[in-house]
Image (cartoon, helix red, strand yellow):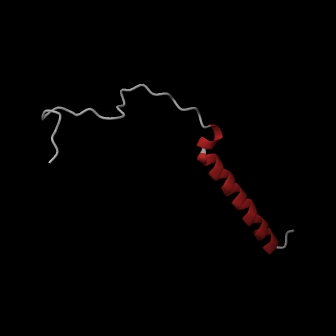
Amino acid sequence: MAISLNPPGETPPAEGSISEAHQERPDGGIWEHPALWAGLILLGSVIFAAFFIARIFGYG
């Protein structure tokens, strides 16, 4: 069994305490907006499917 360095009832010190100062990371710009990319992919899929539907009905 390991020997405890802290008396019972005391919280041991933790690494990476949230009380330490930290720098804010820079804004990721457009890469942090996945809904935009999902919307563009969905729009492209709809246009692609519409092309084949139009071919089935004789347009194009």
Residue 58: x percent and y percent?
Answer: 84, 73
Residue most extreme to the left: 8
Q: Is residue 1 left or right of residue 43?
A: left
Viewer-nearest residue: 38 or 49: 38
What residue sits 60% from the left and 47% below the top? 34
- Give the number of callouts: 0
What residue sits 69% from the left and 52% below the top? 40
What residue sits 65% from the left and 49% below the top? 37
Position of residue 35 relative to residue 57, above or below, is above
Viewer-nearest residue: 24 or 14: 14
Residue 25: x percent and y percent?
Answer: 54, 32
Q: Is residue 25 left or right of residue 15?
A: right
Residue 39: x percent and y percent?
Answer: 65, 51
Quadrant (top left, top right, bottom left, bottom right) of the C terminus:
bottom right
Q: Identify the image quadrant of residue 27.
A: top right
Residue 15: x percent and y percent?
Answer: 33, 35
Q: Is residue 12 left or right of residue 23?
A: left
Position of residue 20 relative to residue 54, above or below, is above
What residue sits 77% from the left and 70% below the top? 52
Position of residue 49 relative to residue 4, above or below, is below
Viewer-nearest residue: 45 or 34: 34
Position of residue 53 relative to residue 29, above or below, is below
